[in-house]
Image (cartoon, helix red, strand yellow):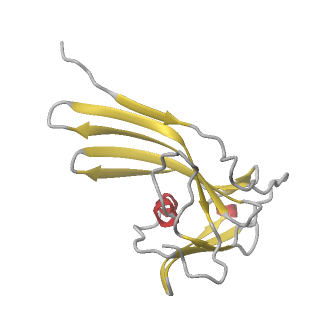
Amino acid sequence: MTPVIATSCFSYPRYPDEWAKIQDIQTSDCPHIAGQYNNKADVPQSSFTSYRALGDLLKYLNSPKLDPLSHVEINQASNTKIEVKAWNQDELVWSKEFNRDEGDFKCESGMILFPSVSKTEFDSFAIARTSATLSLGMSIDGSLVVKQEGSTIGAIILIIPIIPAYGSGIEWYRFTPLINEKPNI
């Protein structure tokens, strides 16, 4: 009989109590999230998070790898159109427009929800398939709040055995606005 080894992890933390509350929007209107935000994330105390930068999370909006990146700009002309721009100081490195009428996002409970995106990633000792959904909102202190809900299934390859792995969870990130300051890299 061959022993089977597997690993899994699950984490579903609530919105951090120590952060300013998310703006409450009672209708199907989208929150107003326009602004320029530092790339570096504030994360909840005593939390394990996969990403520490807004540029890393943008891969779930189908961006290329964005490194280096100083800040992200979000323009929101209406409830139906959002433009996301990624900057390295004064150099525009990526830009994409999203249209609510074309199904690029929807708005629920004061958050802008983007459809789930899946990515396959490889490294020397593992292969993983990650699916994630991003939700963006605005806190009452003007910070951009990002909720990432996702799951990963993969294998850790240690010659023999191959160890299957699965995880799912929610991660919260907060990005402070740029207000006449240099981006926090």
Residue shown at 49% from the left, 76% from the top: 70
Residue shown at 69% from the left, 70% from the top: 81
Which is nearer the eye, 71 or 131?
Answer: 71
Q: Which residue lies furthest to the left in this view?
A: 159
Residue shown at 18% from the left, 12% from the top: 1
Q: Position of residue 28 (x, y in %)?
A: 80, 54
Q: Position of residue 75 (x, y in %)?
A: 67, 75
Q: Residue furthest bottom?
A: 90
Task: Count how many numbered circles sit on residues in the image.
Answer: 0
Which is nearer the eye, 45 or 64?
Answer: 45
Which image quadrant is residue 82 in? Answer: bottom right
Residue shown at 63% from the left, 67% from the top: 176
Q: Which residue lies furthest to the right in this view?
A: 26
Q: Residue furthest top?
A: 1
The answer to whether 89 appears left or right of 25 in the picture is left
Residue 2 appears in the figure: yes
Image vertical order of residue 1 relative to residue 45, above or below? above
Q: Position of residue 185 (x, y in %)?
A: 48, 73
Which image quadrant is residue 155 in? Answer: top left
Image vertical order of residue 55 relative to residue 179, above or below? above
Q: Position of residue 22 (x, y in %)?
A: 74, 55
Residue 115 appears in the figure: no
Image vertical order of residue 118 relative to residue 29, above or below? above
